[in-house]
Image (tube, rainbow, N blue to C red):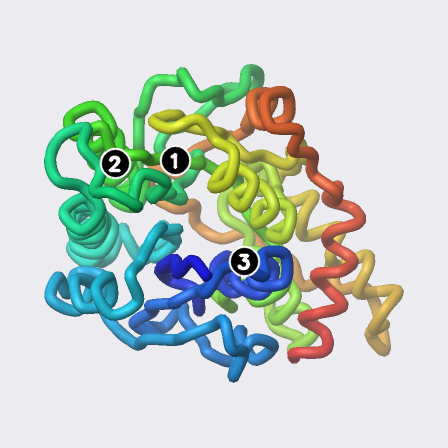
Amino acid sequence: MKSILVTGGAGFIGSNFVPYFIEENPDYHIINIDLLTYAGDLANLSEVEGHERYTFVKGDICDRELIESLFVKYDIRGVIHFAAESHVDNSISNPASFITTNVMGTFTLIDVARKYWMQGPNQYKAGYEDCLFHHVSTDEVYGTLGETGLFTESTPYAPNSPYSASKASSDFVVRSYFHTYGMRVVTTNCSNNYGPKQHNEKLIPTIIRKAISGENIPIYGDGKNIRDWLYVLDHCKGIALVYQKGKHGETYNIGGRNERDNLYIAHTICELLDELKPKQAGSYKDQIKFVTDRPGHDFRYAIDAARLENELGWKADENFETGIKKTIAWYLDKY
């Protein structure tokens, strides 16, 4: 049995990943550390609660003494690092917590792992040669795109918000540990995720929640900002694949090839809600209201996932139109 540390496993993507990985990998024991801030919820992990190969630890990834104790207690042989402050609006109003968690937290984790697994640069301890640190990041580190083009693994970094700057910094920390110490690392940069268990503050849950509660549905600016939407379980499958088969020291972009602008997202959700939960009069679209745009709002993100598809054989199972139906059904049940 191999123990791996998953950070932020009670958050949106982590809480979808943990049950999937446990189900698919019977020889792994997951230790999930999460501070359970506003974005983490143990209810997201009800399906693995009490599972013999799952252990939850409430704690801060910046707490070096705690992280060191977990490595020793469970003999950690791998890390899959989700934990991050991730809401752009919050990073604009409170950037300090993003720098602390995303940069210092990542440094603490990878430095503890290096010292536990390695004797020195390019020297793994006997029996620890297969240990791996997988850093989960975002396409926002690349900045913004014009109307054409795609982010690739070689796109220069150009973060435009405190959030994306903190994630770019953490990516560079991980990269440095590969080149300086010969540590086995991989990084994945994903496009916008959606699906079950996402925090209420994010775009798609907000649209659904506001619609069915009869409130205005807020859309930034003119609603023309474009994102590449990735169904969360497709992302989890990509992460597991890179963790198990990815080339060390490399980055893999994970994207859904589902470019949609925010107004299309809102209209699609409203149209589906009109069918699934009709209003007494009118359409949910009537509730859409444009609001002042976010400062520094990136116009377009879109990922070229060809490397992951061609080298490792990954392919997204959901397009936006199939994934959003599953997502709406889950939120209607929740709300």
Reading the image, the residue beneath label 1 is 187
Label 3 close to label 2 by CB (< 8 Å) = no
Quadrant of residue 87 within the rendered picture: bottom left
Q: CA distance from mark 3 to mark 2?
A: 21 Å
Disc number placed over residue 174 in the picture, else none: 2
> Type of residue at label 3?
Phe
Reading the image, the residue beneath label 3 is 17
Question: In the figure, 328 relative to 137: above or below?
Answer: below
Q: Nearer the viewer, residue 161 or 136?
A: 136
From the top left corner, tell me how far across and down residue 247 is, in percent: 44, 26
> Type of residue at label 1?
Thr
- Which badge, 1 or 3, comes first in the chain's sequence? 3
Does dot 2 land on a helix, a strand or a loop? helix
Question: In the figure, 110 relative to 197: above or below?
Answer: above
Residue at 15%, 26% (x, y): give it.
Answer: 180
Q: Nearer the viewer, residue 101 or 133?
A: 133
